[in-house]
Image (spheres, rainbow, N blue to C red):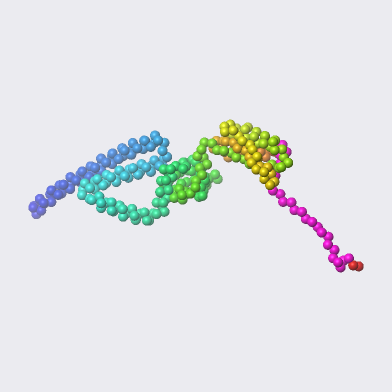
Amino acid sequence: MPDMVKNWLPGLTQFGIDLAVAILILVVGFKVAGAVRKMVDRSFARMDMELSLRKFLLSLLQALMYGVLIFMAAERIGIQSSSIIALLGSAGLTVGLALQGSLSNFAGGVLILLMSPFKVGDYIVSDYGEGSVVSIGLVYTTLNTSDNKTVVIPNGSLSNSPITNATAEEFRRLDIAVGIGYDADLKRAKEILMDIYTSHPMVVKEPPVQVFVSDLAASSVIIGGRGWTATGDYWQSRWDILEEVKLRFDEAGISIPYNQLDVHVNYTDKTEKGDTKR
């Protein structure tokens, strides 16, 4: 028995030393990883990076650092890294098959955060809904509609569909088209429309306002107007201008044609032959 203990003692001693070194690697490594994470987080904050993207990258960095530390500690106590890699690969394949749809949404979320086609606060229009972006998660994007409904869209679908970002630019062009009768005073109508645009406080002076004949339609002359306004003032400006056009055109006696259906009925007197004989 003493001989057996003597034979085991060197191996146990070496294992104890390796185990202590592995624990030391983990303890010191976790502290270093935490310091690196804080340093990178401050760098991301100075770059004004999107919060969701910042959290995702920090979590990914932390997972990578922890993985390296665990590999180092495992090899120190004699566990082969190839065995760990095979185990993780098998587990990853199983999880991937079980969460295929969620992983697609996750990948879509990563693409949205990296490419930044929109950000929180933007108003977007997509095939799956439109509204102001409330949050961009790794799996879902949440919108708030103009009538105060919440729309939750999977990122996998959103990243693979056309998206219109209505508030991406500081200014937005405000187009108005209005029809007048062919017998109306065209020059006067253009003067009124130009005055409405240029006098509106939300319409900017540059680029200059344009008023023009857009089309000669079947029942009306279409006058077009173009001006620029701040993106946040777009809808209020549009509503104001449309209302003012109707009021000013009515005052000036300029008619705005609308579709009408005229029905003509012809009455024909028919006398039966039998009635002409007495």
Residue that appears at 57% across and 38% down: 173
Can residue 248 be seen? Answer: no
Can residue 86 be seen? Answer: yes
Up/down of 125 relative to 199, above or below: below
Percent x, y for residue 252? 72, 36
Looking at this view, is 139 or 179 the one in front? 179
Percent x, y for residue 121? 49, 40
Give the dominant element type of the magenta stretch: helix, strand or loop: loop
Residue that appears at 78% across and 55% down: 265
Which quadrant of the structure image shows residue 50? top left
Looking at this view, is 271 or 102 the one in front? 271
Percent x, y for residue 87? 28, 53
Which quadrant of the structure image shows residue 224? top right
> Residue 85 vs residue 248: left or right?
left
Percent x, y for residue 40? 35, 37
Any magenta on residue 181? Answer: no
Region rendered in magenta: 252-276
